[in-house]
């Protein structure tokens, strides 16, 4: 067991009680803040090298949102750590009853490559705030960021209590042989069995888990809406990070009439965002690696290409060529194209449920549109599939938005926009069913990494009251006991 | 296997029909459960007597009273528990609706245990129904009379498709666990807990595992020993020691060990009289297998009191062991019987160290006149729950979450915590399709100016209280207007 030494080193630090005082946790969190400030440029460069992440996006998701979480946590740490006093019943009136937030111990955070800083840092913030020691296992696929984390984090955090482990599948498997007190896993659903593997490994040690997985996030667009605004918001959510976002709108459901209206609106939005030649825009990303690129490219053989469809393997770019604007031909990647270069991200129209692109989470800059007759058909379509991480619905009519919300089930829901619900730290972020279990962000991260321990501190006196509960039992005692224990329904006043 | 598929399939179809979503429906089912408990009280007490030799008043206070309390609480609070919870918004989402919507998970599985066979199935069931789920109930086959009763009664009072009862032993439970559930709540031991979690992992099903362990009980030299020992004896010997939160073993200074023994002996006399075996208030071990197991733990031990046993009636007298060694068999597994080992430690430091060297227990008990010492023990150890200066009682306060940590389990329930365990808290953000102005900040092409505005709207650098927020809000509106003008 190659990691046994590391884990026991952290466990020894944990048992010493080092991570428990508030001052210690605060100091580590502030060090993380300095990491974000001082290494900002390195982070922007590493993520650009890993997946061509546009610096605006990288700043927004990897620095700004992380600082937000850090500040929320630092502002509230004292309050969150406090014992939570609870309402008492008659028999415990004179006692002290509270919920103590205990750290779990040594926890493991496994993060993915698509938002390689945010997706380890935000859980880490909560884990440190809750008083744990942490092993961080960043993704080997975003190798520049992995190296940055491995080399630089140790300069900021206490190396006795926080460690970074690098490597691939084999290393992660060996790491999971060790006992951890909590495992936090974020992974894409491109490989849905990984979540199961993690939970099965956790079961061997009865380790609780949070699994942030993915799925196909549906985006329903009703006929009544401001088409240009919808197109902009959907395009933004879809093509952000070249589509490699677990909460991206995966596919659109709309009527055939709306599909016709959306096309030009989407084209306008895409041009507004990335200019006439997106491959040259600094604001459009790239697919992270060859394997992922090939997977996404294979999905293009679905529906008909309304925009884009061209790919550039060398650059791992998927988008549109300057000559294909206006072309509505059936295009398949197997077709030999004269110039495999790019202009804009891709929209596929008239996609069928049986098409390849509807069989897995896309995780790429392709937006398929599936035509449905009405909102009922859209809801049925969504409910026939595994529950996604998020459901999106666009309509000027709030009743329609509410209908979709009430009749579907998903991790989260955002009406009339995409992605934004995760920027509000007071909302829990997590999946349900295939899209995951558990939740985090803001206080929810702190709560995820804390054991909520029920504490009742009684007095040694007033023993006579306790006499009711001791044997020998009799009906009289029971009557009195019932009177003191019973929770009566309100509004049952016999006087009236 | 096929039968399980059918039962679960029917429950899922019934859930998908949507009928258990309305609050009225859930209230109706909870009311029916309440009627069941009130009307069938005699039958319930009879089953408990047959399974565990539990007498009327005892069985009522241990198993029925708590259930009625949870039902009343759930029915009272359901509207407020199920209501969407608005959350604090930031500048960017000021004009939007942001809230958490509690939703049912779907079809959940409750696997009960045999030691409190009625309440351990009913309490989770109440939470699961209140949260709007379909529930498959699998009572423990070891307490066979109560299992049969539950299987007979539930269909008479509740919706048959939504809340089926499955009876049977290991093969039936294994078959059941191959089906897909949206949550599994299991009460039992750690070994089976691992099997349940592994089965759940195949479907990515979240689990609540209420397991066990050896709950330590530290008695400080500075405490009212008579009171402490009475409380400990009550918690230890109730249900013949077959309680997951019973004080499993005592840690105390060697100088008070004999006083502890004397006090417990005196209490046992008070509780059960001269002849424990003929006391109607003393239960029996549930079956021969456990009877033999517990007797085996006595081998080679110094028996300070008790030790009498009768296999025919599965009777084991309340027993106290002294000067027990940490390496002995009785200290290896959860006793789950009326045997109380006392181990001596020279200080509270030694006690804390002893506790921390072992698996995290379901509960921890500490008796002392010193509040400071109690606080210290709580802060330097970990356990599912704690009661200071008493035992068991934290279980009865439904505002406290009841559950384990580490080997003693994961997740919690009781009261509102049951409702939350069986609900999905769905994050909802509803924006306006208009007000596109501020959104332009985030769209490409990127620029430093946009970054600076984004920082303004998003960064929570300060928390200056209400007045600050109002000023911030005003600034925000001004900023929004300016942005719209410059980017719009």
Image (cartoon, helix red, strand yellow):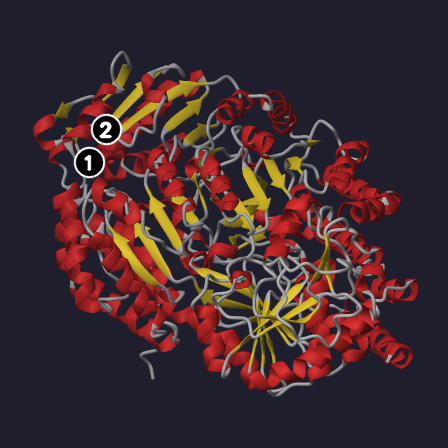
Relative to B448, A471 lies left or right:
left
Find residue B322 and report its horizontal and vertical position in percent: 34, 17
- Decide which of B464, B136 is in the foreground and name it: B136
Sequence order check: which comes first, mark 1 or mark 2? 1
Could you tell me if the residues under marks 1 and 2 are in contact, i.e. CB atoms within 8 Å?
Answer: yes
> In the picture, which quadrant includes the C terminus of chain B?
bottom right
Q: Position of residue B384 (x, y in %)?
A: 46, 40
Q: Position of residue A78 (x, y in %)?
A: 70, 49
Horizontal arrangement in the rendering, residue B72 relative to residue A273 (left or right): left
Q: What residue is drawn where x is 65% and y is 39%?
A: A131
Q: Which mark is residue B318?
A: 2
Whether residue B94 appears in this view of the structure is: no
Identify the residue shown where x is 38% and y is 67%: B132
Hey, which residue is sitting farthest left in the picture?
B312
Seen from the viewer's position, the closer of residues B469 and A90 is: B469
Q: Name the quadrant containing residue A233.
A: bottom right
Q: Mark 2 — on which chain does it sit?
A: B
Report whether mark 1 lies on the same chain as mark 2: yes
Q: Nearer the viewer, mark 1 or mark 2?
A: 2
Whether B447 is drawn above or below B25: the answer is: above
Q: Secondary structure at mark 2?
A: loop
Residue shown at the point (56%, 22%) measured from the top left: B349
> In the image, is residue A415 above or below residue A342?
below
Name the residue tied to disc 1. B272
């Amino acid at each position: 067991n190659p990691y046994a030494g590391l884990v026991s080193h952290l466990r020894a630090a944990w048992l010493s009680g080092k991570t428990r005082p508030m001052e210690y946790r605060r100091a580590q969190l502030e060090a993380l803040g300095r990491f974000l400030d001082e290494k900002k440029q390195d982070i922007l460069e590493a993520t650009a090298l890993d997946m061509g992440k546009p610096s605006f996006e990288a700043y927004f998701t990897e620095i700004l949102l992380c600082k937000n979480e850090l500040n929320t946590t630092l502002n509230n740490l004292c309050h969150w750590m406090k014992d939570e006093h609870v309402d008492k019943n008659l028999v415990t009136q004179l006692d002290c009853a509270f919920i103590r937030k205990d750290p779990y111990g040594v926890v493991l955070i496994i993060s993915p490559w698509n938002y390689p800083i945010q997706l380890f840092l935000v859980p880490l913030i909560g884990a440190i705030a809750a008083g744990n020691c942490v092993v961080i296992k960043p993704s080997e696929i975003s190798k520049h960021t992995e190296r940055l984390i491995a080399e630089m984090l140790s300069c900021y955090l206490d190396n006795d209590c926080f460690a970074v482990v690098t490597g691939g599948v084999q290393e992660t498997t060996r790491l999971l042989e060790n006992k951890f007190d909590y495992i936090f896993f974020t992974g894409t659903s491109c490989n849905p069995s990984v979540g199961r593997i993690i939970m099965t490994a956790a079961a061997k040690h009865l380790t609780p888990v949070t699994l942030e997985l993915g799925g196909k996030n549906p985006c329903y667009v009703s006929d009544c809406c401001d088409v240009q605004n919808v197109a902009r918001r959907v395009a933004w959510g879809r093509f952000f990070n070249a589509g490699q976002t677990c909460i991206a709108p995966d596919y659109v459901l709309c009527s055939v009439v709306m599909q016709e209206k959306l096309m030009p609106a989407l084209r306008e939005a895409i041009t507004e965002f990335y200019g006439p030649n997106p491959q040259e825009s600094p604001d459009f990303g790239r697919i992270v690696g060859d394997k992922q690129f090939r997977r996404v490219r294979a999905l293009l053989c679905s529906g008909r290409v309304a925009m884009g469809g061209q790919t550039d393997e060398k650059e791992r770019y998927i988008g549109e060529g300057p000559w294909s604007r206006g072309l509505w031909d059936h295009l398949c990647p197997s077709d030999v194209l004269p110039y495999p270069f790019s202009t804009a991200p891709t929209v596929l129209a008239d996609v069928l449920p049986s098409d390849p692109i509807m069989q897995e989470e896309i995780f790429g800059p392709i937006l398929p549109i599936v035509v449905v007759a009405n909102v009922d058909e859209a809801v049925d379509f969504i409910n026939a599939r595994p529950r996604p991480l998020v459901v999106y619905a666009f309509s000027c009519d709030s009743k329609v938005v509410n209908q979709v919300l009430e009749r579907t089930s998903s991790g989260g829901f955002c009406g009339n926009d995409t992605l934004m619900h995760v920027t509000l730290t007071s909302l829990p972020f997590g999946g349900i069913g295939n899209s995951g279990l558990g939740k985090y962000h803001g206080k929810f991260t702190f709560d995820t990494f804390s054991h909520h321990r029920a504490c009742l501190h009684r007095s040694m006196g007033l023993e006579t009251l306790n006499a009711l509960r001791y044997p020998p039992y009799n009906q009289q005692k029971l009557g009195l006991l019932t009177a003191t224990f019973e929770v009566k329904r309100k509004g049952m006043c016999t006087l009236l | 296997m096929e039968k399980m598929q059918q039962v679960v399939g029917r429950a899922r179809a019934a859930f998908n029909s949507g009928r258990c979503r309305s609050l009225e429906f859930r209230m109706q089912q909870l009311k029916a459960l309440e009627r069941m408990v009130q009307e069938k009280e005699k039958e319930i007490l009879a089953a408990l007597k047959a399974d565990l030799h539990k007498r009327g008043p005892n069985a009522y206070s241990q198993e029925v009273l708590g259930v009625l309390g949870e039902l009343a609480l759930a029915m009272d609070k359901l509207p407020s528990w199920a209501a969407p919870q608005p959350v604090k918004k930031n500048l960017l989402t000021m004009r939007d609706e942001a809230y958490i919507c509690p939703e049912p998970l779907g079809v959940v599985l409750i696997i009960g245990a045999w030691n409190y066979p009625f309440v351990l199935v009913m309490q989770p069931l109440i939470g699961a129904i209140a949260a709007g789920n379909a529930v498959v109930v699998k009572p423990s086959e070891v307490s066979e009379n109560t299992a049969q009763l539950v299987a007979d009664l539930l269909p008479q009072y509740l919706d048959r498709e939504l809340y089926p009862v499955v009876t049977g032993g290991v093969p039936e439970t294994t078959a059941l666990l191959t089906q897909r559930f949206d949550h599994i709540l299991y009460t039992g031991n750690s070994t089976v807990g691992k099997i349940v979690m592994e089965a759940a992992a195949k479907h990515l099903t979240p689990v609540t595992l209420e397991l066990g362990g050896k709950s330590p009980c530290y008695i400080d030299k500075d405490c009212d020993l008579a009171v402490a020992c009475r409380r400990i004896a009550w918690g230890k010997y109730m249900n013949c020691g077959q309680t997951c939160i019973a004080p499993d073993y005592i840690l105390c200074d060697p100088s008070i060990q004999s006083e502890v023994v004397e006090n417990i002996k005196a209490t046992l006399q008070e509780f059960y009289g001269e002849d424990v075996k003929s006391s109607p208030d003393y239960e029996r071990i549930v079956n021969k297998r456990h009877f033999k197991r517990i007797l085996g733990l006595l081998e080679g031990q110094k028996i300070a009191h008790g030790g009498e046993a009768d296999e025919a009636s599965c009777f084991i007298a309340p027993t106290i062991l002294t000067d027990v060694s940490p390496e002995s068999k009785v200290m290896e597994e959860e006793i789950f019987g009326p045997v109380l080992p006392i181990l001596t430690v020279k200080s509270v430091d030694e006690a804390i160290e002893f506790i921390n060297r072992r698996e995290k227990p379901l509960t921890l008990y500490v008796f002392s006149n010193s509040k400071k010492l109690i606080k210290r023990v709580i802060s330097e150890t970990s356990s599912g729950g704690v009661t200071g200066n008493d035992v068991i009682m934290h279980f009865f306060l439904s505002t406290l979450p009841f559950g384990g940590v580490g080997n003693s389990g994961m997740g919690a329930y009781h009261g509102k915590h049951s409702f939350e365990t069986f609900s999905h808290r769905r994050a909802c953000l509803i924006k306006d399709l208009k007000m596109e102005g501020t959104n332009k900040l985030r769209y490409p092409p990127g620029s430093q100016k946009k970054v600076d505005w984004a920082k303004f709207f998003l960064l929570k650098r300060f928390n200056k209280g209400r007045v600050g927020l109002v000023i911030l809000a005003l600034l925000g509106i001004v900023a929004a207007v300016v942005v719209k003008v410059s980017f719009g």
